[in-house]
Image (tube, rainbow, N blue to C red):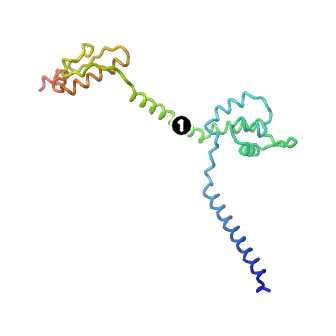
Amino acid sequence: MHDNPLYQAIARRFRQVLIANIMRERAMKVTEKRGRGRPRKPSWLSKVAKIQEDFEATDTPFFDRSSIETLFGLGPRQSLNLVHDLGSHRFGNVMVAPRQRVRELLAATKAGKPYAVEVRRVERVREALIKARQGVEARHRRFAVSPAPQAMADLPATIRLGPGELSISFDGVDGLLRQLFQLSRAIAADMLRFEAIVKPRAESQTR
């Protein structure tokens, strides 16, 4: 009977299905083991404070999938999963989550370490964007300048130098930038004279 071609074909197919199922189960166990202890970060984590604010503005005693979708900004499937995770009850054909469970979820999430880490991450990103924008603005800043001074004596009267002292009178940010630019050009053109003017008296007397 075992020599029957049909029987052999069925047996081979059975072994293939059995092996495929065993490999699939092993793969699932490995994936589960790797992910253990590292729960996925909810996609709405960074918006907890705003979600809490919107939640408290409502007075509904139960939240169905549509309400959760609107409140958390999730897709239909994610919203339904969240309703189930919150200990849902069935009202007719609709699954709903009690208001208290939603409140507890939001409070626990906001008090947890992942939220604190996310807040710091968002703040670092915000600071980096501000610095980048400031850098771009600084590089594109334009202001009119006078011909470059060829010596310290060519500096305008609003720039005053002395032993250990530098004083600049200016009107507005552009005025200050213009004069700092002029001073840098004058120093580059007459470095020895600049050192002699600003060198502290005590240092000059010692030498």
Q: Tell how many labels.
A: 1
In the foreground, 100 or 152 = 152
- From the viewer's side, name the closer residue of 165 and 104: 165
Q: Quadrant of residue 53?
A: top right
Query: Does 101 sit left or right of 146 as displayed?
Result: right
Residue 75 at x, y percent in the picture? 70, 42
Q: Quadrant of residue 143?
A: top left
Quadrant into which the N terminus falls: bottom right
Please, is residue 137 above or below residue 73 in the view? above
* Residue located at (62% from left, 52% from top): 37
Towards the viewer: 37 or 156: 156
Neighbour tally class for label 1: few under 14, some 14-19, many 20 plus, Cα within 10 Å:
few
Q: Position of residue 30 (x, y in %)?
A: 62, 61
Q: Is residue 77 left or right of residue 128?
A: right
Residue 95: image x %, image y %? 81, 42
Q: Which residue in the protein does label 1 denote?
A: 120
4 to 50, vertically: above or below: below
x, y (%) of residue 46? Answer: 61, 37
Image quarter (top left, top right, bottom left or bottom right) of the C terminus: top left
Q: Dot 1: what SS?
A: helix
Residue drawn at the location 45% of the way across and 32% of the way down: 131
Name the amino acid, label 1: Arg
